[in-house]
């Protein structure tokens, strides 16, 4: 964006004066458009720079979430902790011991809340804040073999401080 703005700025600065046959209104219109365009380019550069700042720095300090390690393997989930509290922010660190799996977290109403891939040799972080108590199910969304359908785990979320 900065390069595009610089190229347009260079053209504007290098452009010569208008011919004498332009009226004062036309010249004034060109000046207004020139400054308006420069303002929009500057705003575009600022928005682009702001989008490059990592989101946690933009959002401020929200507290470190509790980390729960998750390992997917044919055909089960190994979850370090299967309990959480309402309002608690949890960072699931998801990986796989064998093949790709799809880690999907379903709420008490069986609506999918979040999902990520479980891949061998790589850890994906999935941040979730539990908003209501109940039984949350973890299902695999990536076909991983003949017992894929049985790859289910549960997390209990309770009220409490």
Image (cartoon, rainbow, N blue to C red):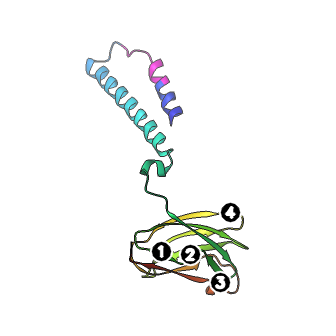
Real-space CA distance between mark 1 and mark 4, rounded to the nearest whole angstrom: 25 Å
Quadrant of image for the C terminus: bottom left
Q: Please tell me whether residue 18 belongs to the stretch shown in magenta.
A: yes
Which secondary structure lies at badge 3? helix
Residue 33 percent location from the top left of the image: 34, 28
| Quadrant of residue 74 within the rendered picture | bottom right
Q: Seen from this angle, which residue lies furthest top? A: 20
Tag in front: 4 or 2 = 2
Q: Closer to the camera: disc 3 or disc 1?
A: 1
- Residue under pointer 1: 84
Write the start and end of the magenta stretch as one range.
10-19
Q: Residue at x 57, y 63 (%)?
A: 125
Name the secondary structure under disc 1.
strand
Residue 58: x and y, percent? 44, 48
Determine whether label 1 and label 4 are within 8 Å by CB.
no
Name the element at disc 2. loop
Q: CA distance from mark 4 to mark 2?
A: 20 Å
**CB under 8 Å between discs 2 and 1:** yes
Q: Which one is in front in this view, the residue at disc 3 or the one at disc 4?
A: 4
Q: What whole-number distance in Å separates the C-alpha atoms at marks 2 and 1?
A: 8 Å
Q: Residue at x 49, y 62 (%)?
A: 65
Give the mark nearer the N terminus: 2 vs 3. 2
116 in relation to 34, above or below: below
Task: Identify residue for label 2.
Answer: 81
Position of 77 with respect to 127 (left or right) is right
**Mark before the other along the chain sequence, 3 or 1:** 1
Q: Which mark is residue 122?
A: 4
**Residue 148 badge:** 3
- Residue 72 quadrant: bottom right
Q: CA distance from mark 3 to mark 1?
A: 26 Å
């Amino acid at each position: 964006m900065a390069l595009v703005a610089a190229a347009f700025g260079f053209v504007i600065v290098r452009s010569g004066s208008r011919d004498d046959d332009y009226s004062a209104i036309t010249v004034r219109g060109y000046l207004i458009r020139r400054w308006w365009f420069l303002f929009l380019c500057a705003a575009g550069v600022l928005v682009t720079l702001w989008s490059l700042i990592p989101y946690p720095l933009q959002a401020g300090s929200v507290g470190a979430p509790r980390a729960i390690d998750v390992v997917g393997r044919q055909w089960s989930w190994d979850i370090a902790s299967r309990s959480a509290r309402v309002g608690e922010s949890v960072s699931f660190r998801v990986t796989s011991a064998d093949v790709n799996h799809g880690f999907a977290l379903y709420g008490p109403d069986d609506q999918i809340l979040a999902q990520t891939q479980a891949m061998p040799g790589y850890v994906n972080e999935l941040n979730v804040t539990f908003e209501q108590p109940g039984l949350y199910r973890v299902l695999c969304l990536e076909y991983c073999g003949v017992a894929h359908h049985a790859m289910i785990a549960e997390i209990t979320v309770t009220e409490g401080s």
